[in-house]
Image (spheres, rainbow, N blue to C red):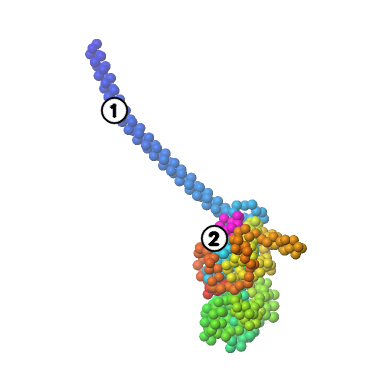
């Protein structure tokens, strides 16, 4: 009995020892498994969080894209989300680019606009192509190129552009300058002379060809045709190698101003039958007078009659009405504020923003211009017209006088130049035609002159 009891006690002790050993190993294993499970859970959560983050980023990108697209998915109604706008301008040496920089801050004050990105492009033709492709939502172009685009002709043959105007802008003036000893006083006098007509495919050359055509002349009637840009034309005239040259730009053109300092010149008018034929055949031309006695505009002894091609601000026809209306309002108010930083924008009357355009005015913009007409009518009847919303302007700006006529200089817009986020490295808008800007009537800014 005692033996049996002793064996039982020994067995129980051995079992306890074994259980104690297994317990220690089991705890370590349990801890290890718990740690592995915890680590696995953390990795899973991290992975899930990363996935959620990626989904959120993707969703944000989609929302951003949706916001961008909402600017051009209008159906005549407003009430959509704020939009992002990519503003197509021109080469950094012309006026389009600093104008975009100045209007960036103006448009971004709108509750309907999230942001504006200003990009340097090949100017008119590329800007229209970019709007057609959905790459730009706002752009500045010359009227002759826009006219061809809506008609689906010339470089837009068979592919009419679905664009509309927010506003008309400043004119690019056809300026024909001859040396004082050339005996050139009319376009007809260019026959048998050596003439600079601008770079091949540029807006300058297109204007030159059309003006000559209206005078019954062609390149064959000239003693020499020089495809020179502004700087080279001036150099050749100074050296006595050219008798005259065409310049199509804002007034004044700094190259002409420089030439006048060293050479006696004559401004050749584009007037009479030549101007009439030009305006009749090409509706985007308009009459223009370079005034006499204006120091900021060559300080001429006599006024010179010529023609000009207007620049316009365009958007896709599908832009929401409320966005287009607000852009038109803010542009008009900016012009009237006295706070305009780009000289080219001081060279036209804000009352003409929707007048005599060769591209249809966007219905949203037109709605705003109708309110101006109503206000003017009310003021004429003795009522107090709405002076416009100056809430976005500083007190100093709001109290400044209305927009004054001023010259365009090389420094135009220097203070307002935006960050250079370029979509095309076209240094000058008057450069040789490229794949995206073939024979652009708007590609005529070079030599840092106030041009598009």
Q: Secondary structure at mark 2?
A: strand
Which element type, helix, strand or loop, lies under badge 1?
helix
Q: Is residue 113 magenta?
A: yes
Using residue 2 as the reference point, say whether residue 281 is left or right of it. Answer: right
Q: Quadrant of residue 23?
A: top left
378 or 237: which is nearer to us? 378
Location of residue 144 with respect to 269 vertically, above or below = above
Residue drawn at (65%, 61%) of the image: 329
Q: Which residue is mark 2?
A: 117
Farthest-out residue, top: 1
Q: Which residues are magenta?
A: 107-124
Looking at the figure, which quarter contains the N terminus? Answer: top left
Which residue is tagged 1? 21
- At label 2, counting other C-alpha atoms closer than 10 Å, the crowd grade (few under 14, some 14-19, many 20 or more) is many
Indicate the quadrant containing the C terminus: top left, top right, bottom left or bottom right. Answer: bottom right
Judge whether 163 appears above or below 81 on screen.
below
Residue located at (58% from left, 88% from top)? 181
Determine which of the numbered discs, if any, sits on residue 3 in the image.
Answer: none
């Amino acid at each position: 009995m005692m033996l049996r009891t002793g064996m039982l006690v020994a067995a129980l002790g051995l079992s306890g020892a074994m259980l104690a050993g297994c317990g220690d190993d089991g705890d370590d294993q349990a801890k290890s498994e718990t740690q592995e499970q915890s680590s696995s859970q953390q990795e899973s959560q991290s992975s899930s969080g990363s996935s959620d983050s990626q989904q959120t980023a993707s969703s944000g990108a989609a929302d951003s894209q949706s916001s961008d697209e909402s600017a051009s998915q209008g159906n005549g109604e407003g009430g959509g989300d704020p939009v992002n706008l990519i503003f197509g301008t021109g080469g950094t040496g012309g006026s389009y680019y600093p104008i975009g920089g100045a209007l960036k801050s103006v448009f971004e004050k709108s509750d309907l606009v999230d942001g504006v990105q200003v990009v340097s492009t090949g100017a008119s033709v590329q800007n229209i192509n970019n709007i057609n492709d959905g790459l730009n939502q706002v752009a500045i172009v010359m009227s002759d190129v826009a006219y061809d685009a809506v008609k689906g002709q010339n470089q837009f043959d068979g592919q009419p552009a679905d664009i509309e105007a927010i506003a008309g802008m400043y004119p690019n003036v056809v300026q024909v300058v001859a040396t004082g000893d050339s005996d050139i006083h009319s376009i007809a006098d260019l026959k048998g002379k050596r003439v600079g007509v601008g770079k091949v495919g540029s807006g300058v050359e297109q204007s030159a060809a059309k003006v000559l055509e209206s005078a019954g002349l062609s390149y064959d009637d000239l003693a020499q045709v020089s495809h020179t840009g502004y700087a080279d034309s001036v150099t050749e005239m100074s050296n006595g190698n050219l008798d005259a040259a065409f310049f199509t730009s804002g007034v004044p053109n700094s190259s002409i101003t420089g030439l006048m300092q060293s050479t006696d010149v004559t401004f050749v008018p584009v007037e009479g039958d030549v101007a009439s034929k030009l305006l009749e055949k090409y509706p985007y031309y308009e009459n223009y007078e370079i005034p006499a006695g204006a120091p900021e505009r060559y300080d001429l002894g006599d006024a010179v009659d010529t023609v000009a091609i207007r620049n316009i601000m365009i958007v896709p026809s599908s832009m929401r009405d409320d966005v287009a209306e607000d852009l038109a309002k803010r542009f008009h108010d900016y012009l009237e504020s006295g706070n305009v930083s780009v000289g080219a924008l001081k060279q036209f009357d804000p009352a003409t923003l929707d007048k005599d355009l060769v591209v249809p005015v966007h219905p949203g913009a037109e709605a705003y211009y109708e309110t101006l007409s109503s206000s003017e009518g009310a003021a004429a009847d003795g009522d107090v017209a709405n002076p416009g919303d100056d809430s976005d302007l500083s007190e100093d700006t709001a109290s400044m006088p209305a927009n004054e006529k001023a010259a365009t200089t090389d420094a135009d817009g220097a203070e307002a130049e935006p960050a250079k986020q370029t979509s095309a490295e076209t240094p000058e808008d008057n450069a040789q035609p490229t794949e995206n800007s073939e024979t652009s009537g708007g590609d005529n800014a070079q030599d840092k002159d106030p041009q598009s």
